[in-house]
């Protein structure tokens, strides 16, 4: 029976695959940098911070001259706004008549502090860069919107993984700024237990590499980075899907080699990764969830190693928000583990319902 289900899921995936080539959404995007002068971090340090932001669509202004069609999408740890150009997200959401149709919505895709083309340790300060946290990142997002783009209200914040956590922080730090929240793939408790452990393992692996040299390396600490990459592959994977697709040892090892080779081509910096993984250290929106009174669509997936559903955390905490709806996506060979958050086919119908909620 299980084998039959796997075959049926695979057949459905084949039939659901669009026959046309994916659109290059980056060609329709506008790129800009917003500089936040004398930005003050929670540590008390100040510096000019650059936030790189990508936008799709055109801002619309209401009778008062306020932009009234802005939505913001927030990436996960180690990501950037550019990840939301991938077909599994963009082709499902941005086209004509779709839920985030860029002919209707002004879509804002920032690179957060420490990520992408925004200010980060690898720009030159290395381990002397201010030790930012999620509050700093959300504060910078708010300043980028108001001071840089002239956006004083959002119709939606959709956040994936780290962005999921940021969406909850937003709901408490700036109540009502966003009229709807869609946090995907996170919990609302401190990063502890196994979640903190694998992050700390990655940080320790990088720091233990002799080439790291206290962050002052001339050659990248490749062994430490490799270990961190290995841990992220395990943490992000779907065990059922990987077992179904790579049931033999040689196939599994070949997939691993291909994945590592592909990921090794990026220009990830060791110090940037340490900061990215550590920035969640004091995250804890749980005590303030009752402040979030706007409609919330909170989605986790049953195959998420990072946010294991058996803990039952989100299911309980969603009830603390008066207008929150929690969905736990079922486990299947087609879901993507933690990364299910950016495969819009699994949740776009529910997002469409949220967008018409007043």
Image: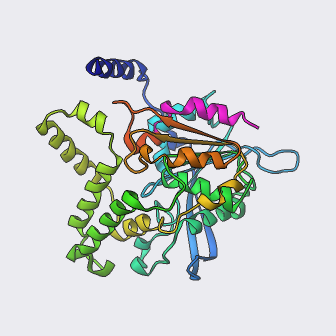
- The residue sitting at 22% across, 73% down in the picture is 209
Asked where in the image residue 213 lies, by quadrant, the reply is bottom left
- The residue sitting at 76% across, 49% down in the picture is 67
Instruction: Tell me residue 223's x, y (percent).
Output: 20, 65
Instruction: Tell me residue 165's x, y (percent).
Output: 54, 55
Coloration of the structure image:
rainbow
- The residue sitting at 33% across, 50% down in the picture is 235
Q: Is residue 344 magenta?
A: yes
Q: Is residue 269 visible?
A: yes
Q: Please state which of residues 41 and 292 is positioned toward the viewer in this rendering.
A: 292
Q: Is residue 264 magenta?
A: no
Outermost residue to the right:
63
Q: Is residue 316 left or right of residue 146?
A: left
Q: Quadrant of the C terminus?
A: top right
Q: Please state which of residues 278 and 66 is positioned toward the viewer in this rendering.
A: 278
Instruction: Tell me residue 48's x, y (percent).
Output: 58, 76
Q: Is residue 316 left or right of residue 63?
A: left
- The residue sitting at 48% across, 64% down in the picture is 280
User: Measured along the vertical axis of the image, is residue 140 above or below residue 3?
Assistant: below
Q: Please state which of residues 29 and 292 is positioned toward the viewer in this rendering.
A: 292
Q: Please state which of residues 343 and 183 is positioned toward the viewer in this rendering.
A: 183
Q: Dominant secondary structure of the magenta stretch? A: helix
Q: Is residue 69 left or right of residue 340?
A: right
Magenta stretch, residue numbers: 343-358
């Amino acid at each position: 029976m299980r084998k039959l289900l796997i075959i049926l899921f695979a057949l459905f995936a084949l039939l659901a695959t669009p026959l046309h080539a994916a659109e290059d959404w980056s060609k329709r995007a506008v790129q800009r940098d917003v500089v936040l002068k004398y930005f003050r971090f929670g540590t008390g340090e100040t510096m000019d911070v650059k936030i790189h932001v990508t936008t799709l669509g055109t801002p619309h202004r209401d009778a008062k001259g306020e932009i009234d069609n802005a939505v913001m999408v927030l990436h996960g740890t180690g990501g950037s706004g550019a990840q939301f150009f991938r077909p599994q997200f963009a082709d499902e959401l941005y086209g004509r008549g779709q839920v985030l149709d860029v002919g209707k919505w002004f879509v804002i895709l920032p690179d957060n502090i420490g990520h992408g083309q925004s200010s980060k340790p690898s720009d030159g300060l290395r381990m002397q860069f201010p030790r930012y946290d999620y509050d700093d990142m959300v504060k910078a997002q708010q300043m980028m919107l108001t001071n840089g783009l002239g956006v004083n209200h959002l119709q939606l914040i959709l956040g994936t993984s780290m962005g999921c956590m940021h969406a909850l922080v937003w709901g408490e730090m700036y109540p009502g700024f966003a009229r709807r929240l869609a946090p995907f793939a996170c919990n609302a408790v401190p990063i502890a237990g196994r979640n903190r452990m694998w992050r700390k393992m990655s940080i320790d692996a990088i720091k233990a590499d002799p080439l790291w040299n206290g962050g002052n390396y001339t050659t990248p600490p490749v062994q430490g980075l490799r270990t961190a990459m290995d841990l992220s592959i395990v943490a992000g994977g779907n065990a059922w899907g990987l077992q179904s697709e790579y049931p033999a040892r040689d196939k599994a090892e070949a997939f691993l080699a291909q994945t590592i080779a592909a990921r090794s081509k990026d220009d990830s910096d060791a110090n940037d990764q340490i900061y990215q993984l550590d920035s969640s250290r004091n995250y804890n929106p749980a005590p303030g969830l009752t402040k979030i009174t706007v409609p919330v669509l909170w989605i986790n997936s049953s195959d998420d190693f990072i946010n294991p559903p058996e803990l039952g955390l989100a299911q309980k905490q969603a009830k603390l928000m008066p207008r929150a709806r929690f969905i736990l996506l079922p486990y299947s060979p087609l879901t993507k583990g933690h990364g299910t958050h950016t495969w819009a086919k699994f949740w776009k119908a529910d997002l469409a319902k949220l967008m018409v909620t007043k």
